[in-house]
Image (tube, rainbow, N blue to C red):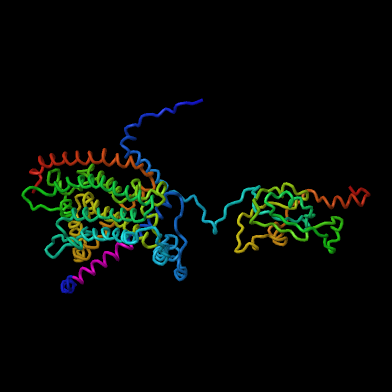
Amino acid sequence: MPYVVERKPLTLSERLYFPQILAGMRVTLKHLFAPNVTMEYPEQRPAIPAGYRGVPTLVKDPHGREKCVSCQLCEFVCPPKAIRITPGEVPADQTDRAHVEKAPKEFDIDMLRCIYCGLCQEVCPEEAIFLQNQYSMTGYTRAEMVNDKARLYELGGTLPDQHFKWDKKKAAAGHGNAH
Amino acid sequence: MTELWNSLPPLLQAVIKGLAVIGVMFPFGGACSLIERKVSAAMQGRPGPNRAIPFWFAWVPGVGPFLQRLGVFHLLADGGKMFFKEDPVPGHVNKFYFYLAPVVGMIPALTTVTVVPFGAYLDEAGRLVPLVLANLDVGILAVFAVSSLGVYSLILAGWSSNSKYPFLGGIRASAQLISYELSMTLSVLPVFLMINAPGTEGTLSLFRVVEFQSGTWQGFRMASWHGTWFIMTMPLAALVFLVALFAETNRLPFDMAEGEADLVGGFHTEYGAMKWGLFFVAEYSHMLIGSGVFVLLFLGGWNPLPWVPLASVAGELHQLTGWAIAVSPLFVGLLSIGIFLGKTLFFIFLFMWVRWTVPRFRYDQVMKLGWQKLLPLALGNLIFYAILIAFLQPKFSH
């Protein structure tokens, strides 16, 4: 439905122009003495809101155990194919996790490809991968921009766990109910 | 001191004066660019340049970090960068005029400053002597004549760049300058009608204009007229002059020649490094000189307040404190330079203030404003004051 915008004729002060300029100068003068709205970045850091999607990281459970079971769902769902997982066995020294069977031998996320979409976190059945609040990734080489497994755990740290899924499975198996 | 100076050959004197002008105007131009960045930052709620610091200054407690916050070292860093960075010359330009343009821009900018008095001192006889490199009797004419040459630099730059946007910028600059030069010249005529009373020696000297504004309060009589500044008696002329000044110096809202939104960078699109820097030093020099001339013509020059001339301030100070230094040429000279520079710097700030407030005019608006508004205003103003002065001048001549 076309309509006509009504153009009001200019008032006298608008036609004289100077009152309008002076009004504008009053505004800018007020801003001249107003405090800065910017943040001096490297020294001051912004507060990161909850739910922020920063760099994807791998997390450990509260007992310090690896959560990823190397199912590779994140690798398959990753739209830019930034994740590359080499599956492997659970190391022999982790006796309490022997029943988990699989763990990633290598886990690389190429941050030059990552688009921070969060689908890996969405898809992970083990709640092992999280986009946390680190927002600044820099490096001098392409190799530096690939986060390997050690780096991912270093970035991720430990997050609280609601389920302890594999402990429950082990307890259930002890009572004769493997599934 | 003066004997030594007078004993020097005139050529050497001229060289020293010339070097002094360059030594003063260049740093001032650079400092203005820094002030511009700081003022614009403050108006936009940013801190502005505050990072650069030479490491040995970082060791000085208090002062070093303070200067760093002020951004002083960015000025040096910018200047150093301009001097030492690669200076590319595009293959398609007319080399001779391309090199000539920034030089042609600098020459009028540095030449006009010689005829602008920037202070005054009292000699032994108690007379006011202007501090000026060349005290020409045609003062204002010299300023107008030489400073208008500055537009050649923009035209040359725009034309020799051999590329469409600089060309448009150069054309706009010339059209704009011609349009506003008229109103500018017409707006100062009433001032000179006023100071040239019939029967006295005619003059166009800027020093005489300030002298005319240096009267004391004589009660509510015509004699008090001399103490007022011309901005009080001729506000419209001052306004027209100021608007024309903005246009002449290519400052927003009249920076048609640059117009980075529609013309990339306008006339200096193809320039880089120090050649580009020279355009900017020239622009800031024009601003400084324009502001200085405005202060001299309409704001009483180096007089601190209306009806409070410089000489009486020095005299009062001498009587109050008894210090002989209060009337010494050095003290009065420095005081007058301080007052004059203070007023001029306020105008520099005004230029920046307006720049960061008002958006750029459209080209047709600039032309309309110049020819249809300012020119009739300036003409009407001239006629009004010519008639007024013809009737009143016999009454308030001494």
* Relative to B299, residue B334 above or below: below
Q: Residue furthest left?
A: B199
User: In which quarter of the view is residue B116 placed?
Assistant: bottom left
* Relative to A56, residue A150 above or below: below
Asked whether residue B302 appears in the rendered view, the answer is no
User: In which quarter of the view is residue A91 placed?
Assistant: bottom right
* Relative to A86, residue B367 above or below: above
Instruction: Indicate the position of residue B248 as horizontal and vertical percent values.
Output: 28, 49
Instruction: Indicate the position of residue B162 as horizontal and vertical percent values.
Output: 37, 54
Residue that appears at 59% across and 51% down: A47
Would you say residue B191 sits in the magenta stretch? no
- From the viewer's perspective, tell me whether residue B205 is left or right of residue A96: left
Would you say residue B21 sits in the magenta stretch? yes
* In front of the other: B210 or A104: A104
Residue that appears at 35% across and 41% down: A21
Q: Quadrant of the N terminus of chain B?
A: bottom left
**Count of labels shown?**
0
- From the viewer's perspective, tell me whether residue A143 is left or right of residue B321: right
Q: Which residues are magenta?
A: B11-27
- From the viewer's perspective, tell me whether residue B129 is left or right of residue A110: left
Q: Main secondary structure of the magenta part?
A: helix
Asked whether residue A52 appears in the rendered view, the answer is yes
Q: Residue furthest right?
A: A176
* In front of the other: B125 or B154: B154
* In front of the other: A136 or A147: A147
User: In which quarter of the view is residue B94 placed?
Assistant: bottom left
Instruction: Indicate the position of residue A87 as horizontal and vertical percent values.
Output: 79, 58
Instruction: Indicate the position of residue B323 as horizontal and vertical percent values.
Output: 20, 65
